[in-house]
Image (cartoon, rainbow, N blue to C red):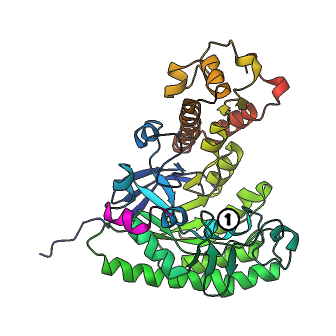
């Protein structure tokens, strides 16, 4: 009798429960360095560290994985150094799964000093590029750019991005794509998909397979293809079908889009994508966006915002962001949030946090970041449980009604 091979692949995804009539679901992503229970928020440790926290402190917030940036790690310390250290997780002493993005977002956005509303050509919206010396030039093969650190010239294309990401050794990596903007015309979006993003995806996939075979002694890395198409339904669906028909391990839901349409756009993409592979939403962290994207089918997502606003004194509360530097907190010795289980709220008062920020102490950023990361992680944990037990709609209504309460109508103490 022939014995069946029951060994699981090094990367796989299983779905557990679903939102009736919608794409939202819970699941588990299995990677060589552990599992991710989805939906899940993935904190961003841009340079192999989440600013102000040790990896141990980040893990204590409940974070299941960490995302680092290929562009920044390529510039320093160099991908070869991370490779020699045994990969991103070993280098950073992070015990769980890791992600790296392709570097394309930073190469292009830092090139003209804009983020999701940038203009790479200087032709359609020249006033944007004119505000800063241009540091990036795109063509159909890739992007030539100057380092934001020292002005040295470099070039990324799909092959280079794959080589860097394989050296970084993350469990989940992303194909190289062109970051378009809402300022680009429909015609430009069509051209970008046909001449750059989709051909670059196929080149990324070929190079990924080559490197996987060449580095067979290394843990398997899953390649996600990044879907583009801005706010256009036909382009989003076309791009999603393109990736879904190819041998990608999962999908990145990327590109510029309007906040008010975010759930609809994610839904267009997920309509076309295969159910058996995970979907990562690039760059969201506001509660309304989180609920909308999870409902529409996103499994994981990342964002720098919780840490960034925390370092600037804005702490998440059930009733929105609170500026802890406000004078009213000077002699308020209560925990920031008595119902929060994070290390900060369990051990420090509002008055102490207020003092740290006013005194410009480094500990201020650490304690605020711990709280904000825990707030978002716990929120997504609760959403995951609500999908499993059928209370998603009730949880969404309660959380969003409270979080977006106007400041003048917040309960006493907030």
The residue depicted at 59 percent of the width and 86 percent of the height is 199
| Residue depicted at x 20% and y 71% | 4
Q: Quadrant of the C terminus?
A: top right
Taking 277 as reference, is 239 above or below it? below
Nearest the camera: 301 or 298? Answer: 301
Indicate the secondary structure of the residue bearing disc 1.
Answer: helix
Left or right, 218 with reference to 230: left
248 versus 195 height, above or below: above
| Image location (x, y in percent) of residue 284 | 65, 52
Q: Image check: 377 left or right of 231? A: left
In the image, is residue 360 above or below residue 124? Answer: above
Q: Residue at x 57, y 82 (%)?
A: 200
Q: Is residue 193 above or below residue 335?
A: below
Report the span colored magenta: 76-86
Residue at the spot 79% in from the left edge and 54% down from the top edge: 260
Q: Is residue 11 visible?
A: no
Q: Quadrant of the N terminus?
A: bottom left
Badge 1: how crowded within 10 Å, few (<14), some, or many (20+)?
some
Residue at image mark 1: 110
Location of residue 378 by image quarter = top right
């Amino acid at each position: 009798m022939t014995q069946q091979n029951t060994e699981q692949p090094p990367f796989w995804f299983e779905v557990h429960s679903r939102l009736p009539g919608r794409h939202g679901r819970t699941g588990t992503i299995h990677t060589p360095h552990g599992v991710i229970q989805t939906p899940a928020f993935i904190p961003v440790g841009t340079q192999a560290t989440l600013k102000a926290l040790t990896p141990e402190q980040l893990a204590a917030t409940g974070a299941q994985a960490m995302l680092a940036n290929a562009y920044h790690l390529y510039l320093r310390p160099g991908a070869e150094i991370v490779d020699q250290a045994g990969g991103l997780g070993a280098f950073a002493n992070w015990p769980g799964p890791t992600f790296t993005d392709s570097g394309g977002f930073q190469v292009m956005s830092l090139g003209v000093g804009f983020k999701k509303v940038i203009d790479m050509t200087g032709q359609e919206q020249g006033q944007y590029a004119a505000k800063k010396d241009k540091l990036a030039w795109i063509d159909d093969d890739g992007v030539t750019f100057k380092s934001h650190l020292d002005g040295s010239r470099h070039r990324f294309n799909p092959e280079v991005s794959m080589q860097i990401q394989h050296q970084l050794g993350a469990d989940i990596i992303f194909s190289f794509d062109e970051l378009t903007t809402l300022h680009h015309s429909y015609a430009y979006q069509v051209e970008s998909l046909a001449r750059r993003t989709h051909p670059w995806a196929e080149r990324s996939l070929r190079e990924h397979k080559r490197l996987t075979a060449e580095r067979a002694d290394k843990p398997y890395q899953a390649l996600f293809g990044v879907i583009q198409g801005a706010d256009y339904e036909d382009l989003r669906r076309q791009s999603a079908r393109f990736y879904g028909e190819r041998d990608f391990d999962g999908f990145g839901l990327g590109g510029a889009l309007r906040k008010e349409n975010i759930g609809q756009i994610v839904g267009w993409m997920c309509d076309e994508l295969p159910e058996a592979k995970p979907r990562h939403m690039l760059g969201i962290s506001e509660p309304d966006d989180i609920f909308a994207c999870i409902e529409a089918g996103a499994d994981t997502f990342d964002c720098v915002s919780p840490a960034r606003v925390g370092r600037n004194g804005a702490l998440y509360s059930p009733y929105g962001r609170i500026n802890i530097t406000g004078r009213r907190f000077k002699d308020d010795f209560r925990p920031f949030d008595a119902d929060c289980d994070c290390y900060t709220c369990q051990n420090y008062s509002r008055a102490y946090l207020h003092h740290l920020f006013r005194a410009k102490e480094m500990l201020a950023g650490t304690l605020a970041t711990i709280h904000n990361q825990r707030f978002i992680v716990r929120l997504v944990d609760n959403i995951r449980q609500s999908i499993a037990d059928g209370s998603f709609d009730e949880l969404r209504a309660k959380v969003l009604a409270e979080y977006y309460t106007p400041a003048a109508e917040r309960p006493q103490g907030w």
